[in-house]
Amino acid sequence: MNRESRMRTTMNQKLIEMGERERLKEFLGVKLNECGWKDQMKAHCKEFIKEKGWEPVTVEDLVVEITPKGRASVPDSVKKELLHRIRAFLAQNAN
């Protein structure tokens, strides 16, 4: 494992151990709901299913279809705030 992978693992462990990961997930959910992102993704899923017609659609099909659009459509302001919160947590808890 290289240095970057070890650092990533350590940071993730610290986020989990201190409960910050769950708080960040909750924050992200609220922000994505507030900006209408969740509704956009739900509409995109419905449209995808409608386009498929009678063909069965699996959860895996939806994930493959939605993931790129979902990631690309998260507002920059939400990404910046999330990154700021992660950096602030890590700065406060760097040992």
Image (tube, grey):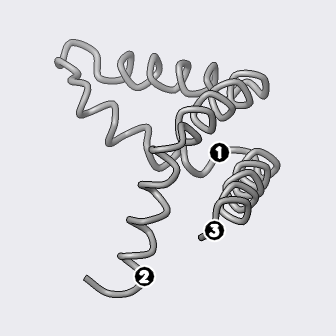
Write down the residue under mark 1: 73
Q: Amino acid at mark 1?
A: Ser
Q: Residue at x 25, y 82 (%)?
A: 1
Write down the residue under mark 2: 4
Q: Position of residue 29 (x, y in %)?
A: 63, 27
Q: Residue at x 77, y 57 (%)?
A: 84
Q: Residue furthest right?
A: 77
Image quarter where the C terminus lies is: bottom right
Question: Where on the picture, by quarter, is residue 87?
Answer: bottom right
Q: Alpha carbon of mark 2 to alpha carbon of mark 3: how far? A: 16 Å
In the rendered structure, which disc, 3 or 1, sits on the residue that comes first in sequence?
1
Q: Position of residue 21 (x, y in %)?
A: 53, 41
Q: Mark 3 packing: few (<14 Cα in 10 Å), some, or many (20+)?
A: few
Q: Mark 1 packing: few (<14 Cα in 10 Å), some, or many (20+)?
A: few
Q: Amino acid at mark 2?
A: Glu
Write down the residue under mark 3: 94
Q: Alpha carbon of mark 2 to alpha carbon of mark 1: how far? A: 27 Å
Q: Mark 2 packing: few (<14 Cα in 10 Å), some, or many (20+)?
A: few
Q: Is residue 70 above or below residue 76?
A: above
Q: Residue at x 74, y 30 (%)?
A: 31
